[in-house]
Image (cartoon, coloured by chain):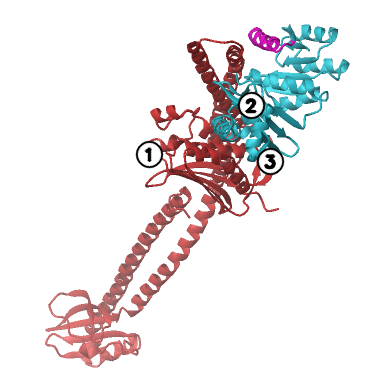
Amino acid sequence: MRILLVEDEEKVARFISVGLKAERFAVDCAGDGETGLQMATLNPYDLLIVDLMLPGISGTELIRRVRRQNTEVPIVVLTARDALSDKLTNFESGADDYLTKPFAFAELLVRIKALLRRGAVPRANVIQIADLEIDRLAHQVRRNGVAIKLTAKEYGLLEYLAANAGRVLSRTMIVEHVWDQSFEGLTNIVDVYVRQLRAKIDEPFEKKLIHTVRSVGYVINENGEE
Amino acid sequence: MNSQSIHFRLIAWYAGVLLLVLLGFGAFTYTTLRFFSHQVLGESMAHRAQQIADLVASEPAAKDPGYVAREIEKRYDPAANDRFVRVSRGDGNGLYLSGPPNDRSFNPEELPPRQGSAKSSSYQIEAPGGTALLVATQRVRVGNDTFLIEVGATLTANERLLHRLLTTLLLGLPVVLGVVILGGYILTKRALQPVQSMMRAAQEITISHLSRRLPALSSDDEIAHLAAVLNQMIARLDESFQNTARFTADASHELRTPLTIIRGELEAILLGRKLEPELRDALASLLEEAERLVRIVEGLFALSRLDTGEAQTERVRFDLAKLAETTAEQMCLLAEVKRIELVYETATCVEIEGDRSRLKQVVVNLLDNAIKYTPEKGRVSLAVRSQNGSALLEVSDTGPGVSAVALPHLFERFYRADEVRSREIGGAGIGLSIVQSICIAHGGAATAANTPPTGCRFTIELPLAPRS
């Protein structure tokens, strides 16, 4: 998978490309809109990450021009502005997703993965992690064949973790996905629910599935390590 | 009418001064008229006495004893004119006494004769029966005899005149005063009307409407100048407010990129490598602080957008009671962890109009605040109701309450009621400011009060949605 990152802030570009490379993506970087547009037209990218505030051609303009030739490639916008009007302008110009700085890298990764598999891989109806089984149609959870009763929020949390199994999810991401933006900043609610979820999913069993990554967030995986 | 208003005071002063002037003028008129009317009557009596004295001293009187009486009756007819005439000799023998007057207001025979020996005098006397008379006397010598001539007239006519004057004055005074107050009312109302409308306009210019101005007045008077001065002041306020809001927005904007880098780099390190435990702890702690900075920046940005009115994105009609209930349900676990009882007092539908997600944030922030400050096994209650055309949402807790010093500042940015405790509990110090700004943006208000003996209560008041 090849990704083009158009970002004028060198340091931001660096940690994103380092992080993406660690996830086995091929990453090209462009430091301004002009270069970005050239690279996007010359090479077949699987995904574009575009910062809005670019010297030369603005991010919005770049997306508009790219879209004239290529309507398929997913585009993620990065911006330091989060006014709703900006959001609308960008979706109109052809962006697929939108992240406001400062974002968590984990969040960017989740969004990228979601965009890349969009349409390609059908959403699994049953997620299996070790002996944990989550039926996303029936909203039912079993472990080792035994049905476990979860509240709606607990289920939402588990499903979000499981859909991103092996990926560390930050508390902010969890709050935004499982709750809503009103709970932003109230990340301790995540800890409370994770504790509750662990009591039902993990405590009765020897093999623990939900792991804490200190200060970063939570991850669910079967390897028993972070 | 408000007794402190300029309107009222102007009229009160105006009417008060006029009342004093009218009373003074009335009293002056009354006493002057009384004095002069008595004086004129006295002069006329003295003149009459002199005429009778001349009669007594005349030649025919010496020859004919009945002459004087006849002449007096013929010329003056005292009884018919309600006058009193008595002519007596020095030894007390009467020469003439007028008959009782037509109105029988006094009996001439009962009037005591004037003592003394003054040539002429004038005095007031009260006849038995209460009628006041003004009497002029004149002594005249004819040969060896001294005659005393007394001429009197009742004061009744004078008194009647004065009485009518007094009545007219007393009746006229309230009428004049009423006309004056009415005139003053209309006059001051017209003069103060621009002030009233200016006041109303100024009231409407709140923080979110600082771009508005008072209507310019076409006149060139003090009030037009006042409006111009006020407008200049509002313009300066507007400018400095805009500057502050822009500064906050710019600052939080500028902080975003460095924060992205700090956060991203730290996350990358923590996720990617096996690290020494000490280093790991230090980096994790740095990341926590970075997250806190992020929250502060986000909060500040949200506040500046609320302040400048940019944030008003959607206005939908919804049930605040329902929103509060679902939010409380979502947060009950936070309360349970501290074994706090979270009570929700259900109300019937309380419909308001506004941005649903922002108002949800109000509920979240208030409940979060209450849960944070309530000790274990305490109680937090949430109530929604409509009252006097407003929607009220109250969050009460059984925490330690807020000191009286801190209470007025609770909604200020970065204000911490209790330095030590707040740091332990954490939080950006702008949660309540956000609550207040959201309420103001919705045309409402947020207030806090202690609830003795323990705990405090936060109340938000929002306008109800208009009846559909």
Please, which chain is the residue tagged with disc 2 on?
Answer: A
| Residue B210 visible in the displayed image | no
Residue B415 magenta-highlighted: no
Q: Residue furthest right?
A: A69
Task: Have a look at marks 2 and 1 and say if they share a chain.
Answer: no
Residue plotted at (22% across, 75% down): B123
Q: Nearer the viewer, mark 2 or mark 3?
A: 2
Q: What is chain A's hue in the picture? A: cyan
Q: Can you tell which quarter of the image residue B80 is in?
A: bottom left
Judging by the rendered image, the residue that carries numbered circle 3 is: B315
Say left or right for B170 vs A159: left
Say left or right for A59 vs B135: right
Seen in the picture, residue A97 relative to B45 is either above or below; the reply is above
Seen in the picture, residue A158 relative to B443 is either above or below; the reply is above
Say left or right for A116 vs B365: right
Q: Of residues B41 and B355, which is closer to you in this image?
A: B355
**Mark on residue A173?**
2
Q: Assess whether mark 1 and mark 3 are in contact (beta carbons under 8 angstroms).
A: no
Q: Main secondary structure of the magenta part?
A: helix
Judging by the rendered image, the residue that carries numbered circle 1 is: B404
Amino acid under label 1? Ala
**Mark on residue B233?**
none
Q: What is chain B's hue in the picture? A: red
Residue A9 magenta-highlighted: yes
State the extent of the magenta-drawn residues as a range.
A7-25
Q: Nearer the viewer, mark 2 or mark 1?
A: 2
Residue B276 is situated, as x and y percent measured from the top left of the image, at 51, 10
